[in-house]
Amino acid sequence: MASTYTPQDAINLATALNHNAPPDGIQVYAVDLMNSFIWVAFPWTWTRKTLTTISLSDGVQDYALASQNSTDFYRFVNLELNQTSTTPNVVRALSQKNHLSQELVTTGGIDTIRHFSWEPSISKIRLDYPAAVPSGTTIVIQGEYQYVPTKITESTLTTALTLPDHYFQVFLEGVRWKFYELTDDPRAGKTQEAKGRAVHTGQKATFMAAFDAMKEAEDFSDAEDVVYPAGGTLGVGRENFIPRIFF
């Protein structure tokens, strides 16, 4: 179902409920800050795009994103290798590492390459080995990535949020908190640390409770890693890069 609520809806409701609001220009900052806060907390389903497939080349370890992905790339959700030249295709999930060194000696095939990293200095995906792609074999990188949130401005206040309508209440509670915070209203609340845990008060506590409930609702994981096929019905657990909401 398409989203219908807009940032202006949140501004209107927050103004009515708070009985006070920052000046017009500050209101835009409030909704944009809250949109970004929620967006980057987790790779929600509505913040993902399908990666344009990238073909592996023999002896090559680093791969650039397609131009249509590089303009809005934020982080990877999942990547896998797909050997499309066989029937059925051979698909292998990859685990993400913070950094991989350049490999100048050993090459690897679809059953040897196990990891990838995103190397910001060169803006490329790096595999743990340069690919070994024999003649007549086609292997591609495929998967999903989270794209950067679109900045909310005065001109887009009436454009529907990407956030689904059933989570609009969470966004609204966050905007109310930001309104209080930006007007130095003590009802904004604060965060203190107690016995190693963050304890929120005021409107911030109301928002964080709604936000945590939203995260729980979206956490479909059974806490097991994705399974890497090892042949037959056997499988070896693989690391799953997706940040876990709860540990």
Image (spheres, rainbow, N blue to C red):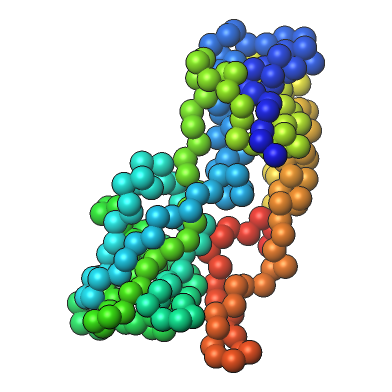
In the image, is 133 to the left or to the right of 3? Answer: left
In the image, is 46 to the left or to the right of 73? Answer: right
For residue 78, above or below residue 233: above
In the image, farthest residue toward the front? 87
Q: What residue is drawn where x is 70% and y is 44%?
A: 198
Residue 24: which quarter of the image? top right
Residue 186 showing in the rendered view: no
Q: Quadrant of the C terminus?
A: bottom right
Along the line of sight, the residue nearer the viewer: 98 or 13: 13
Q: Position of residue 152 (x, y in %)?
A: 52, 24
Q: Position of residue 224 (x, y in %)?
A: 67, 72
Q: What residue is drawn where x is 61% and y is 48%?
A: 44
Q: Position of residue 220 (x, y in %)?
A: 72, 59
Residue 240 showing in the rendered view: yes
In the image, is 100 to the left or to the right of 146? Answer: left
For residue 83, above or below residue 171: below
Residue 209: which quarter of the image? top right
Q: Quadrant of the N terminus?
A: top right
Q: Position of residue 75 (x, y in %)?
A: 46, 51
